Amino acid sequence: MANSNIVLLLINFHLIFLSSLNFSEAQLAPAVFIFGDSLVDVGNNNYLKNTVVKANFLPHGIDYPGMKPTGRFCNGKNVADFIAERAGLPSSPPYLSLVSRPGKIDNATSLLTGANFASAAAGILNNTGIALYKELIPLATQVDYFATVSEELKQQLGPSAAQKRFAKSVFVIVTGSNDIIYYVPFADPSGKYNTQQQRMDFVLDTLEEQLRRLYDYGARKFVVTGVSALGCCPFLRAWDEGGVCNEVVNSLTVTFNEGIEPMLRKLKSEVKDMSYTYCDSYGILQNLIQNAKLYGFDENKAACCGQGNYRGKLTCMRTSPYCSNRSDYLFWDPFHPTEAGQRILVDNIFDGPSKYTFPLTVRQLIAL
């Protein structure tokens, strides 16, 4: 009788475990995996010892549940949180919070609904930002981390079940800003790429290489955002007497973005079963700036937290002045939108309009 009870318990445990592998009707996808920079970092940089690029102090997070500074460069939730929320999932945890040493994942069950590999100030290229910020997690290393996750879930679920899960999951890539700021305008250290266009093509080729690696590890549904209108952020406005957008930087950004979607089309034509959504973050931000009042923003140039002209010359620090009416501001700090701004951005890419997401909205991509 005792043996029968043990068998029944084992059967029930097995059934419960299997049911956990399926996702509820409220969930649109089984998991969301996030790659990129400070727009989607939810705390990975907190675990880096040799970088000053961290947001683990107030007033960052002042509007996050519990007034908790988590490492998000925002007053509250960011793009990564809202994408997970719209997909009916919890926010993907920072990958480095789940590991005690390289390659050793301590809380593997957390990976079933996704993971976040993003690192503030990091870029597509391995050396982007390193000279200034020492220790960052470039895109290639983020993909290496996903390779570890992929192996872990194959061991947990079995190769076939893991692959099915990856194929239905969403892979979000939000990167490129730092490469445009720190690499494209300057001489290539290797001396190999002599023009801005050559350096830009090198960045795009590297992005394609990393997307191919993700595909090889099981990714099939990609959400890739273009770089936003960097020239209109408070930091660049702060150095102009009239506070106008820096159109030289914006022009670089537009040229870079114009290379992403053709690259995605080419990649889709060369690999099997890949689908993607390209999100025009540049167009969305320009629309928010030009029609700020319609979206509830009284201030569309100055940052809420920072110092100097437009609160843009120095970044948001512990002692920085910050606004009390944060939902009225489009920008939280010299570089990043407020929670309110980031929520609207995700609303636009998740359900359209189609001029900002093509060939599919994120919802349509998930439904495939």
Image: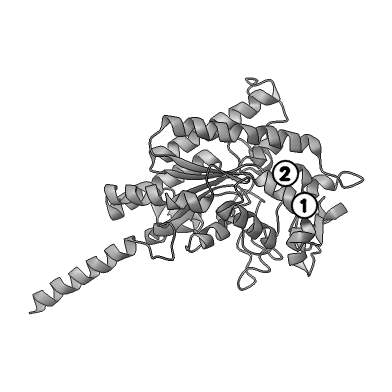
Callout 1 crowding tier (Cα within 10 Å): few <14, some 14–19, many ≥20: some
Secondary element at tag 2: loop
Give the number of the disc on residue 118. none
Q: Residue at x 33, y 60 (%)?
A: 21
Tell me the kind of residue under disc 1: Ile
Q: Give the farthest residue toward the left.
A: 1
Query: Considering only vertical position in the picture, is 188 above or below 156?
Result: above
Q: Which residue is mark 1?
A: 289
The circle drawn on residue 229 is 2
Q: CA distance from mark 1 to mark 2?
A: 10 Å
- Judging depth in this view, the residue of 221 and 337 nearest the camera is 221
Is residue 182 at all visible to an observer of this figure?
Answer: no
Q: Are marks 1 and 2 in contact (CB under 8 Å)?
A: yes
Residue 1: x, y in percent?
Answer: 7, 79
User: Please, what is the three-letter code of the amino acid marked with disc 2?
Assistant: Ala
What residue is shown at x 27% (from left), y 48% (from top)? 160
Is residue 288 left or right of 11 when viewed as pictured?
right
Q: From the viewer's perspective, is 51 left or right of 274? A: right
**Residue drawn where x is 21% and y is 71% of the image:** 12
- Comparing labels 1 and 2, the label whose residue is closer to the camera: 1
